[in-house]
């Protein structure tokens, strides 16, 4: 059996007109971030909608079986951002022939109020689990069966942080326990490929930008050789291996950041996993040589 799986992340669609409404924009974190966005950050993602449409065009030319999306569709988690972005992201996810799976990013869950908005507007079929009884009250982990030999598991590492300078993540303890139980289930543990996906890097434990409990996560994953780890957040596409392991880690970078646009396309043939990077060239996405 062969499968084609596309992983992308960190779209950061432009803030739509009318989004900056009080009282939501008056949150101290958003006020400072909006200033940074206006002066510097926003210009890096000004063409994000064009890039998302470009991904749609690529998916129509190069159909895939599954899409795995690791979050950060928005910038500030505002209601107007959600209402505009939801149908656009849903259109992209629907282009997968057999299904998709998503997790939020820290910009989607920018404040506590954004949590409810995420569940209201981003409740796509791609957000639902094929094994709902395995989820914690947070709704994660979520499972997507991909044939008899492959499975994807999404767990959430994003969370609201009050301070503007703190963009760290954490996997809730109950979710970590549930993930360990899932990985030990025979119908999952025996599969050739287990795609684990979350927004934050698995092995970066920085207090202000990384995953606070990365060490606990890595202890949970140690000794499992059929894993493929996917994340976003860093806006730099990369591939590397866990230390002293053959487990690959793929960062999709950002779909839309100027001069760094990227995604990963995985083609699976039995035990073989072939990864190719997507790149933005001549106003369209193509596969790197």
Image (tube, helix red, strand yellow):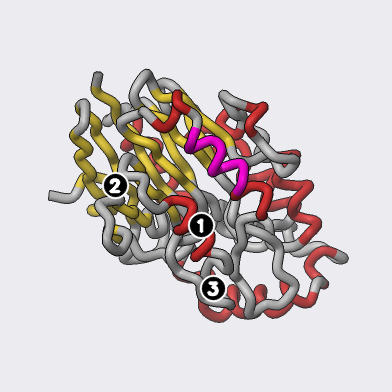
Determine the residue positioned at 59% across, 75% down: 38
Of the residues under marks 3 and 1, which one precedes in the sequence?
A: 3
Of the residues under marks 3 and 2, which one precedes in the sequence?
A: 3
Question: For residue 240, which quarter of the picture?
Answer: bottom left
Give the class, few, some or many, for how many residues have Cα within 10 Å of label 1's Cα (few <14, many ≥20). Answer: many
Closer to us: mark 3 or mark 2? 3
Give the residue pinned by disc 3: 209
Determine the residue positioned at 22% across, 45% down: 276
Of the residues under marks 2 and 1, which one precedes in the sequence?
A: 1
Badge number at residue 217: 1
User: Taken as a whole, is the magenta stretch helix, strand or loop?
Assistant: helix
Quick one: SS at disc 1?
helix
Q: Is residue 235 a member of the stretch shown in magenta?
A: no
- Magenta residues span 177-184
| Most foreground residue, 87 or 157 | 157
Badge number at residue 284: 2
- In percent of width and height, residue 112 lies at 78, 59
**Distance from the alpha carbon under mark 3 to that under mark 1:** 16 Å
Question: For residue 270, which quarter of the picture?
Answer: top left
Looking at the picture, does residue 117 appear above or below residue 190? below
Question: In this rendering, would 133 be left or right of 279?
Answer: right
Determine the residue positioned at 24% across, 53% down: 281
Looking at the picture, does residue 264 appear above or below residue 239? above
Question: In this rendering, would 135 be left or right of 247?
Answer: right
């Amino acid at each position: 059996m062969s499968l084609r799986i596309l992983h992308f992340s960190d779209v950061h669609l432009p803030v739509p007109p009318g989004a900056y409404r009080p009282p939501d924009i008056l949150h101290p974190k958003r006020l400072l971030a909006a200033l940074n966005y206006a002066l510097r950050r926003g210009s890096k993602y000004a063409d994000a909608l064009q890039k998302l449409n470009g991904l749609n065009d690529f998916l129509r030319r190069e159909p895939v079986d599954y899409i795995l999306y690791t979050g950060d569709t928005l910038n500030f988690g505002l209601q107007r951002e959600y209402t505009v972005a939801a149908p656009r992201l849903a259109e992209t996810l629907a282009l997968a022939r057999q299904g998709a799976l998503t997790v939020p990013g820290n910009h989607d869950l920018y404040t506590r109020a954004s949590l409810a908005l995420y569940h209201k507007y981003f409740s796509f079929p791609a957000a639902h689990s094929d094994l709902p009884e395995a989820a914690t009250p947070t709704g994660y982990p979520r499972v997507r069966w991909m044939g008899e030999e492959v499975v994807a598991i999404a767990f959430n590492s994003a969370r609201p942080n009050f301070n503007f300078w703190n963009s760290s993540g954490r996997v809730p303890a109950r979710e970590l326990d549930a993930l360990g139980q899932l990985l030990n289930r025979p119908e999952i543990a025996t599969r050739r490929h287990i795609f684990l996906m979350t927004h934050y890097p698995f092995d970066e434990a920085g207090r202000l930008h990384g995953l606070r409990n990365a060490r606990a996560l890595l202890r949970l994953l140690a000794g499992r050789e059929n894993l493929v780890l996917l994340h976003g957040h860093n806006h730099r596409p990369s591939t590397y291996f866990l230390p002293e392991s053959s487990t690959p880690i793929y960062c999709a970078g950002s779909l839309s950041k100027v001069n760094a646009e990227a995604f990963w396309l995985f083609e699976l043939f039995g035990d073989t996993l072939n990864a190719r990077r997507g790149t933005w060239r001549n106003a369209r996405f193509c596969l790197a040589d």
